[in-house]
Amino acid sequence: MGASVSIDSFSNRHHRSPGSSVPTELPGIATGPLRLVYLDGLRGLAALYVVLHHLHREITYRLDLPHAVLVGTKWLQLGHCAVDVFIVLSGYSLMLPIARSGRRRLDGGFKTFVVRRARRILPPYYAALLMTMIIVLATPSFQTPVGWRSDGEIPSSITGSVLSHLVLLHNLSPGWCSSLNSPMWSIAVEAQIYLLFPLLLLPIWRVLGLRLLIASALVLGLAPHFLFSGNADYTIPWYIGLFAMGMAGAVVGFSIEDRLVRVQRQTPWIYCALLMGGGAGLITKMRPDLQWVIDPMVGAATVCFIADCTRHFFMPCARRPLVLRVLEARWAVFLGTISYSLYLTHSPLISLVHLGLRRLHPSPIQRLVILPILVLPSVFVVALLFHLCFERPFLSLAGRPRAVVGWSGGAEFGASTTSPVEYGERPEGAQIEPSPALMPEGGP
């Protein structure tokens, strides 16, 4: 299994209390090899869910499908929650090397951080934007409304939409937010949070601590909702609070402070995750319009779930919970590897395949059966090729060897992203070892 770790490789020894299967201490300041591939698995499953969510929307939009089909696929209507997971993972991954190094600052400073982030996320983003523009310009049906879901991606102004996407500000206008390639709205949100991470969030953490970091970020993020009576909610400003939750999760999970070690050991993380997730689900059913409440609850559930996975990560593989073994499975980690490319490219491809299928005038049931068969292989093949051409070549430029998955050392991870693709910066002296067992054939 790609996530196997020798606990003795850390600078802190881990002991087990009598009768306990969980270590009483987790690694804090350490530079030994560390590979948390379950984070890649979680990214991969979140990206897969986003694809299925958009495919579900495409199939069910204005179609007279059997009631049983609509009820049985309701679980695919929560695509926004997957983006919540990406944002938390983003904060967690970027904060983890800082938490482990003990230096409480970015390695290389603000400029180095911004350059690495730009090299990592912008080349695939701009390549996907170019691909989308080619599809839109070559397909007249994507330029004029035809009465289908893709009408929502037709920009009111091509020039304004393209320019706003180029500068990653398209999330600030409802006319641009979902235009061209709707999932790209979250890339703009993340890019803006990246700037706030070293300029605002890290200083708040250093001066005020974790609790006030989360509180300050949530207040800052929720303020526009109340100041503008919900009219600015399309920008999802409260995502800065979810990012801060991820930061706090990394610090709590890998701290050697006595107080935080007790929190690591004594908190029933999985029950907290179930409580917050269940609460979010209940509110979604009763008041789905309360997204500003639902998203922070999903974020808190995600942090608690990751904390539980981290605590069980140091158990022998055979004794780990089933969910952790699923997240560490090669297929899940592979999905995490290509998840950023998958996230960027799947939406226009779904619309393009559906456009071709509609010309054959299939019945709703035929469309329900045929569209997934055509779409799913297509989007995964395109995502893999896109990853190899436009994402993987830039991994080394972002400060790492060109391995695809299975990183060890320095708390660097394979990617989503979301979106959301998140890599930490390598602490000084950290050992970087790509995992041959998880590389594709022909890899470096």
Image: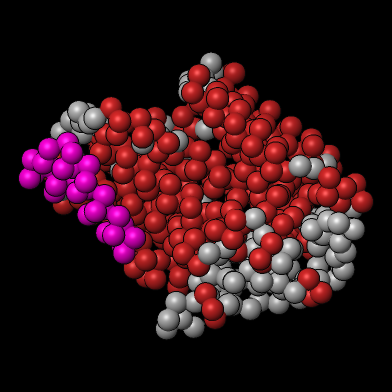
The extreme right residue here reads 258
Q: Is the N terminus in the top left, top right, bottom left or bottom right quadrant?
A: bottom right
Q: Is residue 377 left or right of residue 226?
A: left
Label count reads 0
- In the picture as drawn, the residue positioned furthest to the top comes out as 229
- Please state which of residues 61 and 161 is positioned toward the viewer in this rendering: 61
Q: Position of residue 442 (x, y in %)?
A: 42, 83
Query: Residue 372 colored magenta?
Result: yes
Q: How is the image coloured?
A: secondary structure
Q: Position of residue 115 (x, y in %)?
A: 58, 62
Q: Is residue 89 above or below residue 34?
A: above
- The quarter of the picture where residue 310 lies is bottom right
Is 310 in front, or is 407?
Answer: 310
Quarter of image, res 30? bottom right
The boundaries of the magenta stretch are 354-382
Q: Residue furthest front?
A: 19
- Left-right relation of 256 to 286: right
In the rendered image, residue 53 lying in the magenta stretch gets the answer no
Q: Is residue 209 visible?
A: yes
Q: Is residue 19 above or below residue 57?
A: below
Residue 198 in view: no
Q: Quadrant of residue 226?
A: top right
Q: Position of residue 110 (x, y in %)?
A: 67, 57
Classified by dominant secondary structure, the portion drawn in magenta counts as helix
At x 52%, y 74%, the residue is 438
The vertical placement of 207 against 121, above or below, is above
Residue 16 image point, x, y percent: 86, 61
Residue at the spot x=45%, y=70% of the render?
392
Which of these two is toward me, 90 or 55? Answer: 55
What residue do we see at 52% from left, 33% from top? 236
Q: Residue at 18% across / 42% down in the picture?
A: 367
